[in-house]
Structure formats: C-alpha cells, structure tokens
Amino acid sequence: MAEKKKGGFFSLPVQMIIGLVLGIIAGAMVSPEIGTTWFKPLGDLFIRLIRMVVVPLVFATLVAGAAGITDISKLGRVAVKILLCYMVTTAIAVAFGLGFAEVIHPGLGIDLSTSGLAAKVVKAPSVVDTFLNFIPINPMEALAKGSILQIIFFAIFFGICLASLGDRNKPVLTFFEIVGDTMIRVTNAVMYYAPIGVFGLIAFTVSKHGLAVLLPLAKLILTSFIATATFCIVVYGAIVVFYLRMPIGKFLSGIFEPWLVAFTTCSSAAALAVNMRASRILGATKAIASFSIPLGNTINM
C-alpha cells in the first residue's frame, strides 16, 4: 500500500525551502569561522543520519522485493525493462544537457584555473574487472563499507534463492519485510530534522564562499535547472502521463522532496532513502521500488 504524507503550508518540502532561504540569509551575515563552528555540524549531522539508513534499507527491501517476486522470469523481465529505461533516459538527459550548454554557454566568465594543480593519473579498470567487482568477496565487508553495487548483487541473489524455498521462506521473508518497513519509518523520523540540516548546509556554504563568489555561478546553476526542468517535463512527463496514467502535478509533488535533498546535500546517496520513500508514496510496489531505485542510483553515478 502506498504511504500518505501530510500536506499543508508547513509540509516538509515547504519547511525545507524555508530552511534553505534562512540558511542563505544567515550564512551571508556571519563569518566563515562561525559558519564552520555552528552551522556545519548541523548539516553534517543530517548527512550522517540519511546515510545511516541507506545500507540496511537497501539490503532489506531488495531481499524482500526479490523474494516477493516468486516468478524468476518476471523478475528478469522487470530488470530488463528498468535497465533499458535508465539507459534511454540517461542518453536523452546527456543530449539535453549538451544542447542547453551549447546554446547558453554557462561557463563563460567563470575562472576555473587549474594552474599549480597536478592531476592524479588513474587507470580505468577493464570491463571484466568492473563486472567482477559487482560480486562481493565478503558480503559483510560490502555492507560495512556501504558498497551499494555489491550490496545490490548479494541482496538480489539472496532474495532469489530465498524465493526458491517456497513456503518455507515465510519467516525470513516476513523478517526482511518488517526490517524494510521499519527502515522506512526510520527515514520518516530522520526527515523531521531535514529543515535544520538544510539550513546548516546552506548557511555554512554561503558563510564560507560568500554571495559574491556564488553569484557568478548563477548562470551555470540556472542553465542546469532549465535543462533539468525541460527534460523532466518532456521526457518524464510523457512517461508519467501516457504510460503510468498519473497526473503530472502529483508526480512532481511526490518527487520534490528527494530532489531537494539531493540539491542541498549534493549527494545522490543521501537522497536514496528519501527517494525510495517517495516512490512508495506515489504508488510503486515494494518490489519495484526496492529493486529499481538503488539500481538506478548506482548506475547513474
């Protein structure tokens, strides 16, 4: 069943926007020392709380989702559809970004000089090594380090094998379902702190760099917003309206919260738990949300 969230003027997204605005004002009024001492810990605490829930949430929900789809061929079809969707939409997103950059030229006037900096030479791993790295040598180590791709592989593999046990899997499946639901509740509780965390992150950033430094980036930020908004309206809007048969307003309202978390924290990992919660609010089943959101988050990084 999809979760419901309360609306109203002081709904969580509105509180986060208020925190964002107040953070800009406060950051502009204080010194970098005050921002580092008083505001930065508020933001760091928020990021830690969000990341705290990611690994147990992803693992529990993926196991429950994979084990809940008893037809393995159906799981395979779902996986292929999801991967194709990510590949196509990512390619279109790249085209949108390049197109708007060619038209607006957002980087002109910004000095990003790298003189005096030495780039570290890094050799890209081979395709074979990349795929081998999907498989954890020690699943417990992968869980401890937060290696999401390895966690996804092990969780799906474990879930499929759990599904093959038939009715004997009920106690273990119920356990992971309860753990997943509990982690969603933990995420909900953490998000009560989100407005304060957003305030701290933005206040620290503004106090450190100052509005005079951030304003020249306005063109770059505006270009990114225009390209993203156009992409979401044209591509996601078409999918939502014509394929999912969902009102576009409902969709945009539902995903606003994870967008805001990703923007203020500059971290897709930080937004993962909130994104999974938002997808379930919008009506995605536990299995689909548990499988697609962590996978897409990792692929698009």
Image: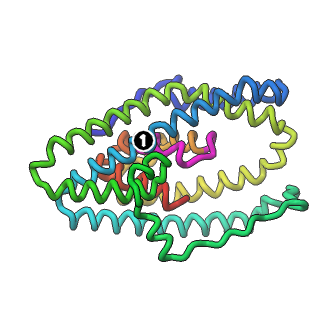
Q: What predominant SS class does the magenta segment belong to? A: helix
Which residue lies under the disc numbered 1? 278
Q: Callout 1: few (<14), some (14-19), or many (20+) C-alpha neighbours within 10 Å?
A: many
Residue 57: x %, y % from top left: 39, 42
* Whether residue 35 can be seen here: yes
Residue 20: x %, y % from top left: 66, 31
Which residue is at 31% across, 36% downward? 181
Residue 114: x %, y % from top left: 86, 60
Q: Tell me how the rendering is colored.
A: rainbow
Q: Is residue 141 above or below residue 50?
A: below
Q: Is residue 74 above or below residue 229?
A: below
Q: Is residue 144 above or below residue 29?
A: below
Would you identify the image quadrant in which residue 243 lies? bottom left
The magenta region covers: 263-278
Which residue is at 72% across, 50% downward? 221
Q: Is residue 112 left or right of residue 274?
A: right
Observer-nearest of 111 and 164: 164
- Mark 1: secondary structure: helix
Would you identify the image quadrant in which residue 215 lies? top right
Q: Is residue 260 magenta?
A: no
Q: Is residue 69 left or right of residue 276?
A: left
- Amino acid type at mark 1: Ala
Observer-nearest of 95 and 188: 188
